[in-house]
Amino acid sequence: MSILVGSDTRVVTQGITGEYGRMHTLACREYGTNVVAGVTPGRGGQDVEGIPVYDTMAEAREKAGANCTMIFVPAAFAADAVEEAADAGIELIVCITEGIPALDEARMKQAVTAAGARMIGPNCPGVISPGSNCKVGIMPGFIHSAGKIGVVSRSGTLTYEAVWQLTELGLGQTTCLGIGGDPVIGTTHIDAIKLFQEDDETEAILMIGEIGGTAEEEAAAFIKDHVDKPVVGFVAGRTAPPGKRMGHAGAIIAGGKGTAIEKMEAMRAAGIAVAESPAELGSTMAEALAARA
Amino acid sequence: MKLHEFQAKERFRAFGLPTPHGIVVEDAEGAKAAFAELGGELAVVKAQIHAGGRGKAGGVKLVRSADEAHEAAEGMLGKPLITKQNAPDGTIVRKVLVEEGLPIAKEYYAAVTLDRRLEVPVLMVSSEGGMDIEEVAEKTPELILREPIDPVQGLPDFRARRACFGLGVPKAQQRAFGAVLKGLAQAFLADDASLVEVNPLVTTTDDRVICLDGKMSIDDNALFRHKGLEAMRDEGEEDPTEVRARKAGLSYVNLDGNIGCLVNGAGLAMATMDIIKLHGGEPANFLDVGGSASTEQVTTAFKIILEDPAVKGILVNIFGGIMRCDVVAQGVVDATKALGLEAPLVVRLHGTNMEQGREILENSGLKIIPADNMRDAAQKIVEAAQ
């Protein structure tokens, strides 16, 4: 098994007729994802390379049986798209869109929670389960391989780097997800780690954090009490200056809090094997697995 | 995006929040006239710069006559004000705010910011007004009260009341105080702020509640729907290189080291800085070219990195997913030729079309040092930059 997405996942793309939405939807389908629909208001009745386009998410849900959405609409319309998906009863909402106002994100999170749905992102690469050839996001499929490691990260390309290092060492993955670098996100490190702990197929977890907020500390505390699988951690940004936003809206050391050093210490205290260097993500995992065997 | 105090107070008044009467001036004569116009016996001259800690740095002066206002303004305008937040160079003061003095009864602290744990905005109030709030949070956290704010509805009445009771606001001032707290929440939501802060929020001996100070930052991601606020941007307060980078769609932060970096993705860009440091070097910048870098963008990024005279070498670290390595490689070659780049350049390309990318670099005839992975790249650039 994998977590979040797998062979039962039926994907609709919100914003499928945009250049970016179209390109990534087709790349997902090529990887093996079951893409059943697209939604662009006003384009209902058209199709994108054989994928039917609907005006509303309710139609995509009813007529195409979509249970997962991948959102590419521009930032100004993203909150509305998420609310429409939640209202339509979509279970998993993967929001790729970046640059969304923080207050919109807070409103999105409330809507998703109220509907009992789950959101990944926003401002994230998405989620992939290589074993079931299911990719819902913008990550390059070919760097992944099927296996037993669960990967959760706030970053995009740093996740690719981590996954590639694992794949090169023959350490395949159950599911890899990027949870996004914004201050308010749908699925947190703890949420993902909980799912990996419960997943029989996942044997070890790689978590990648970055400066800002306290999500890594909270995840570390959770791991200490509830996770018996080996966990490897890394935190990006130990050279980042305080008070400066490092690309991601949530990557900022505020009032002296949220430093990489604090987060790494919290991880170590929880028994997590912390990689000192981003070049050692794969090898630290290999060592952690060997130590357990 | 940060606002100046006088701009924040302009926004406060738009939401019905009481502020002192004040006049913004750009020269000492103006300050003199402003004192006369305010008509009181006491006024305050306040330097308008973004950095906090102005009071202790001499950027806030009490004056008792028009001549004193003139003198105070003259002492600030056109000169750098160095506070603990903008040290060591300080910021040149271009404007001062001349405000009426008030009969202050008590000073409080009030702020609204996004609580990342609760995932909603939160109102923070304290009876310890006028103090450094981070110090209060550190030493006496029980003196800071928090009330969550609904991102749609704002601050409910009962929470505003509870904050007033918690602070021990006298009965005669409670209505006005509660209204100010609700107004601050409203300003935060309506203007898509990332911070609204009033320190101090004062009560007067005649039971008025007034925002004596005002600080406001707007969420950069929301500026598209606040054109009026965007117009309040003061580029003179920003790092000129960071301004140019922002306009080119690049995310750039200047650092103290000598190894420039060009990376795709914020997390990988931070990790690249970290690994340079781990191998004994010092990163000169954070630079994220984003998801799709054209030749023009790579050229602009190189130009921006090279504007920093400390840069002794550049490391390009690209993990191509959507971004194709051959496109990046061509961009690097074109930019290197166009700029006549002489500093050592280490390029690590991985991911989509990486073989084609490496070939382009090899066949370019340029002295580009290829690297196989992040460790190799860091070692090579640190050595080359020495």
Image (tube, helix red, strand yellow):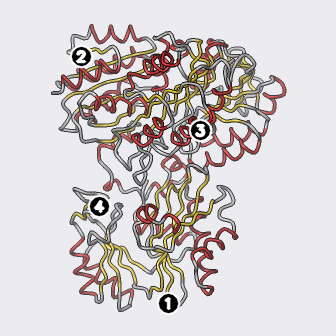
Front residue of A58 and B281: B281
Question: The residue under label 4 is which amino acid type?
Answer: Lys
Q: How far apart are marks 2 and 3 (CA)?
A: 46 Å
For numbered disc 1, what is the local secondary structure? loop
Residue A143 appears left or right of A108: left
Question: The residue under label 1 is which amino acid type?
Answer: Thr
Residue tagged 2: B368
Q: Nearer the viewer, mark 3 or mark 4?
A: 3
* Picture disc at residue B84: 4
The image position of residue B322, as x and y in percent, is 49, 21
Residue tagged 3: A222
The image position of residue A228, as x and y in percent, is 60, 28
Residue tagged 1: B205
Question: The residue under label 2 is which amino acid type?
Answer: Ile
Q: How far apart are marks 3 and 1 (CA)?
A: 51 Å
For numbered disc 4, what is the local secondary structure? loop
Identity of the residue drawn at 59% across and 56% down: B121
Q: Residues within 10 Å of mark 1 (few under 14, many from 20)?
A: few
Q: How crowded is mark 2: few (under 14 residues within 10 Å), some or many (20 or more)?
A: some
Q: Mark 2 lies on which chain?
A: B
